[in-house]
Image (cartoon, rainbow, N blue to C red):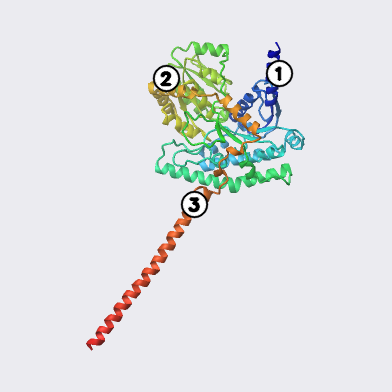
Amino acid sequence: MRLLMSYLLVTIAANCALSARILAVVPTPAKSHQYVIQGTLKALAARGHQIISYSPFALDKPVANYTEIRIECKMAEVGAGKMSLEMFKTFIDASPVGGAKIVWSFGETIMEHIFEDENIKKLIDSNEKFDLLVLESLFSQEATVAFGHRFKAPVVNVHTFGSFSPVKSVAGNPLSLAYIPDFSFPFSDQMTLYERFLNAYSVLSSLHYYYYKHLPIQESFVKSAFKDPSMPPLLDMLLNISLIVTNVNPYVHYSQPNTPNVIPIGGIHLSSERKPLPEAMKQFLDDAKEGVIYLSLGSLVPENTLPQEFFDNFINAFRRLPYKVLWKSERNMTQSDKILMSKWIPQQDVLAHQNVVLFITHGGMLSQHEAINAGVPVICIPFMGDQPMNAKFYEAREIGVEIKFNDLSEETIYTALTKILNTTKYKDNMARLSSIYRDQPTSPADRLVFWVEYVLRHGGAQHLRPASALLPWYQLYLIDILALLLTAASVCIIFMYFILRKLYRLVFANSEIGAISSMKKRN
């Protein structure tokens, strides 16, 4: 009995010792980003850590050890799918560099509003103590990293999608321009000469803008909001981030080198438990013996401003096939026994249903994780951000096909549907990729918890940061060495030129003297 009591006391003491107060300031006004961040915070709360989260979006239901404080963000309507059609088209038509600039511009607007929020002002002025901070600073919210200095606590940065050059640069990761496309390019890891040129140009242009235009604006927010003369330069605080966790699965996404301070946690938002579907939805899926096509274009697409023709193209294409359709839509349209529309659909549970044979998606990263996890092939209609790159990923792995938004018509939709549904390779390839996706030595949640607690145990993890993160670009890419070699070669060439010129003159001068002497003797 005494032994049991001792064991219980030791266990309780250990849990208390590990329990930390973790502050999250995550103002990103996009639900997809918040799902990843909330998944991260839930995993830490389940471990016994006390979470205090400042966010514009609430949890679906309360979670133990998880305190929410709402912050107002005027951009949150964009994240809730209420952007205007003009803004939507601006995203679609933007170049990769232009798209990155739009993201950074949005981030600057977000920071401008967030530091005016009363709850954030109270937080900055408070005397609270925190052991660790969870932020999304490296997604156009760099000013939030100043909370780490304000509360003298290490920072863990959550990056909610894939390859993004500023994240790589700050982490000290290789940019891998020859085979890893930047986040908004519709390229695979097998790029042509022209694609590699565009990728390199885009990344280098974006980094120049990031360091010389965007970060100074973010630093101005830090100075005005915190008013702390001891605050280090913003770039120094970014380089001092202890850990960066990324929403990628290294076993299925493009293989690339990662430094020890970058930890992949792709799928952190996935639930291991299947929840019961609403009865009407379950009956609809169960009765679909031919199969079900599931259509969801995410939370950012402004359905209410899209023309009716957009929806008619889908409906007319669906009518030509025997499959049922489950459609996530905010619009009230005439439905049939073959089409069921709903404003809310539990996507993970629907994709896990055995009768779902195809997923039509906008190509968001969360939907990609969910489709691969469930083994359902896709038709991707990318709109913005990393979605074009994700669409290319589907085609490169032969697990789906892409339809460009500007090419949407009844015929292009029907052609894509029949291509996926009548060709077994897409289903077979997705099944294989799904098996690889789920075959991991540890779950994303366990991996996250270990590394966050690693940071807590050591009071930070700057020892994981490679020296490459601190090197100037001309040293990192050996431009100074190349310049030295070129200078030395130039000096040698110039020296040889003058030597040869001198020899030439001496030789020909002697020849001329000899010729003159010979002429004098003959005369």
Circle 1/circle 3 CB separation < 8 Å? no
Foreground mark, 1 or 3? 1
The residue identified by callout 1 is 9
Question: Secondary structure under badge 3?
Answer: helix
Q: Decide which of 253, 281 is in the foreground and name it.
A: 253
The residue that label 3 is drawn on is 479
- The answer to whether residue 316 is visible is no
Please give the name of the residue rendered at 73% of the width and 47% of the height, measured from the top-left corner. Answer: 229
Q: Residue 502: image x %, image y %?
A: 37, 72
Q: CA distance from mark 1 to mark 3?
A: 59 Å
The residue at 56%/15% (across/down) is 274
- Tell me if 309 is positioned left or right of 231 in this view: left
Q: Quadrant of residue 275?
A: top right
Amino acid beneath label 2: Arg
Quarter occupied by the N terminus: top right
Counting residues from the start of the chain, the first of labels 3 and 2 encountered is: 2
Residue 382 appears at what percent x and percent y?
A: 49, 32
State the separation of the CA atoms marked 1 and 2. 67 Å
Instruction: Give the foreground label among 3 and 2.
Output: 3
Q: Which mark is residue 320?
A: 2
**Type of amino acid under label 3:** Ile
Dividing the picture into quadrants, the one containing residue 29 is: top right
